[in-house]
C-alpha cells in the first residue's frame, strides 16, 4: 500500500469572496465545477484539477455545513489550525513577483542553500501560508 500524489487541500472560511479573489487573481487558479453541496463554496483548478476546495461558512445558516462535516465544521474557521503552509511547484519567478506586486500582495523571497531553489511565500486571506518553489 502506498500514497499517491496530493489531490487537494480544503480551507473553511467566512471570507469566501476574498479567498476566491486571492486564489484566482493573485495565484492564477481558475474557478470551476463543484458538486451541489448545501453550503457555499468554490473549487479552484490548476491544469484541470481541483487543487483547492474552499468551504464557505454561512454563520446565519451553519447547519448544512455541520450536517456534512460534523460538529467541528465551524471550529477555528478563521485560523489555520495545525496547517503551517501549502507548497506548489511553480514557474516564472519574475512573472509571479510582478503579478503579486500588481495585486498588492506582499510576499517573502528565499533561496534554499545548496539547492539553488528560489521560493516565494505569501498568505491567503485566511492566514494560510502559500509556498511557491521555483526549481533550478
Image (cartoon, grey):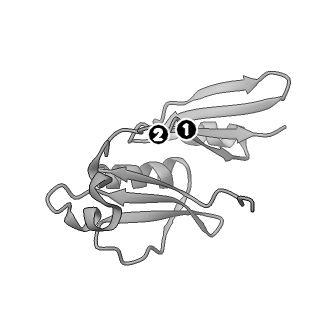
* Residue 78 % position (x, y): 32, 42
Q: Residues within 10 Å of mark 1 (few under 14, many from 20)?
A: some
Q: Do the numbered discs 1 and 2 sit on residues whose CB atoms are within 8 Å?
A: yes
Q: CA distance from mark 1 to mark 2?
A: 6 Å
Looking at this rendering, what residue extends furthest in the left direction?
60
Q: Circle 2 sits in a helix, a strand or a loop, which is it?
A: loop
Q: Nearer the viewer, residue 38 or 88?
A: 38
Residue hosting label 2: 128
Q: Determine which residue is flagged by label 1.
A: 85
Horizontal side, residue 4 vs residue 114: left or right: left
Kindly identify the residue that appears in the image at 56 percent across and 58 percent down: 8
Q: Quadrant location of the C terminus?
A: top right
User: In the figure, 58 relative to 96: above or below?
Assistant: below
| Percent position of residue 13, x then y | 33, 50
Estimate the x, y position of residue 70 in percent, counting from the top left. 31, 60
Point 39% across, 41% down: residue: 125
**Which residue: 28% across, 63% down?**
65
Nearest the eye: 11 or 1: 1
Q: Give the side of residue 17 with respect to residue 112, left or right.
A: left
Q: Which quadrant of the view contains residue 117?
A: top right
Tell me which numbered mark, 1 or 2, is placed earlier along the sequence: 1
Return the residue found at the far bottom: 36
Where disc 1 sits, the SS reads strand
Q: How many marks?
A: 2
Vertical side of 13 occupied by 117: above or below: above
Left or right, residue 48 beside residue 3: left
Mark 2 burial class by Cα count in 10 Å: few <14, some 14-19, many 20+: some
In this picture, is 83 found above or below 71? above
Q: Nearer the viewer, residue 103 or 136?
A: 136
Specify the label residue 118 is tagged with. Answer: none
- Quarter of the picture holding the N terminus: bottom right
Q: Residue at x 22, y 58 (%)?
A: 58
Amino acid at each position: 500500500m502506498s500514497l499517491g500524489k496530493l489531490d487537494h487541500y480544503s480551507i473553511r472560511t467566512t471570507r469566501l469572496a476574498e479567498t476566491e479573489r486571492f486564489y484566482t487573481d493573485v495565484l492564477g487558479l481558475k474557478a470551476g465545477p463543484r458538486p451541489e453541496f448545501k453550503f457555499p463554496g468554490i473549487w479552484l483548478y490548476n491544469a484541470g484539477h481541483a487543487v483547492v476546495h474552499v468551504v464557505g461558512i454561512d454563520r446565519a445558516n451553519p447547519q448544512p455545513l455541520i450536517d456534512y462535516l460534523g460538529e467541528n465544521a465551524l471550529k477555528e474557521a478563521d485560523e489555520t489550525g495545525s496547517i503551517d503552509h501549502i507548497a506548489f511547484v511553480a514557474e516564472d519567478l519574475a512573472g509571479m513577483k510582478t503579478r503579486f506586486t500588481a495585486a498588492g500582495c506582499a510576499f517573502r523571497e528565499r533561496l534554499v542553500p545548496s539547492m539553488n531553489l528560489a521560493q516565494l511565500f505569501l498568505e491567503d486571506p485566511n492566514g494560510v501560508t502559500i509556498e511557491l518553489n521555483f526549481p533550478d
